[in-house]
Amino acid sequence: MLNQSERRILIDKLINNREILLDLIQNFSNDQLVNRKQDGDRTPKGMLFHIADTENNYVWNWAKRSRDEKKPDLSNIPNESNSNTTTQLFEEANEWDTDLLTEKLRVIRESTLRFIAETNDAEFDLLGKNSPFGDLTVHQFLKSLYRHDQMHINELTGKEQTIIITGADGQQL
């Protein structure tokens, strides 16, 4: 069961990493936001869309089902970030106003914080079965969000990647 100290740490990390990400983006020119570091990379604007899309998916398709259903099988929920439609949206994000993208990130994070507030301490231990990352608790899904922000902060700043994401099959993503 999550205690109040762990809940506060989770919330603080979610808030802090999102603030760092949003502050970082404000220092980029529009040219920097729409150009790739190398072929095959998402643009920073595409990355922002990806971050928002991923958070929405993790909270509302995985964590919420894990909290509200008894050991739900999450293997039947497609990873929206890998769909052709979403990949196209990553490209279309280049046309979006930066303020619109940052507002999307703020609104989704506020929604996540409301989800946390509505979740009692014992519910953080509830399990979702067979997500792309294996069986995870509600708490683990939520912790992955600030780690995901950190991973992309490192990418945007050119820092060495300290967060390695591995799927349930052991493959690095």
Image (spheres, grey):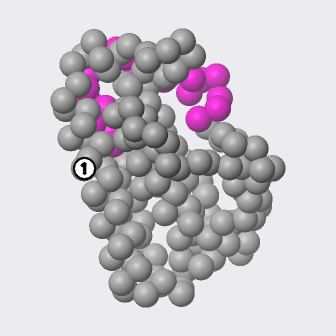
Q: Main secondary structure of the magenta part?
A: helix
* Residue 126 shown in magenta: no
In the orientation shown, which residue stands out farthest toward the right?
169
123 to 163, vertically: above or below: below
Q: Quadrant of the C terminus?
A: top right
Amino acid type of disc 1? Glu
One can see residue 152 in this view: no
Q: Residue at x 41, y 80 (%)?
A: 6
27 to 75, vertically: above or below: above
34 to 11, vertically: above or below: above
Q: Which residues are magenta?
A: 81-106
Name the residue nearer the viewer: 34 or 104. Answer: 34
* Left or right of 34, for residue 145: right
* Left or right of 74, for residue 11: left
5 to 102, vertically: above or below: below
Residue 61 is situated, as x and y percent measured from the top left of the image, at 59, 54
Residue 29 is situated, as x and y percent measured from the top left of the image, at 21, 19
Residue named by callout 1 = 19
Q: Secondary structure at mark 1?
A: helix
Q: Residue at x 55, y 80 (%)?
A: 123
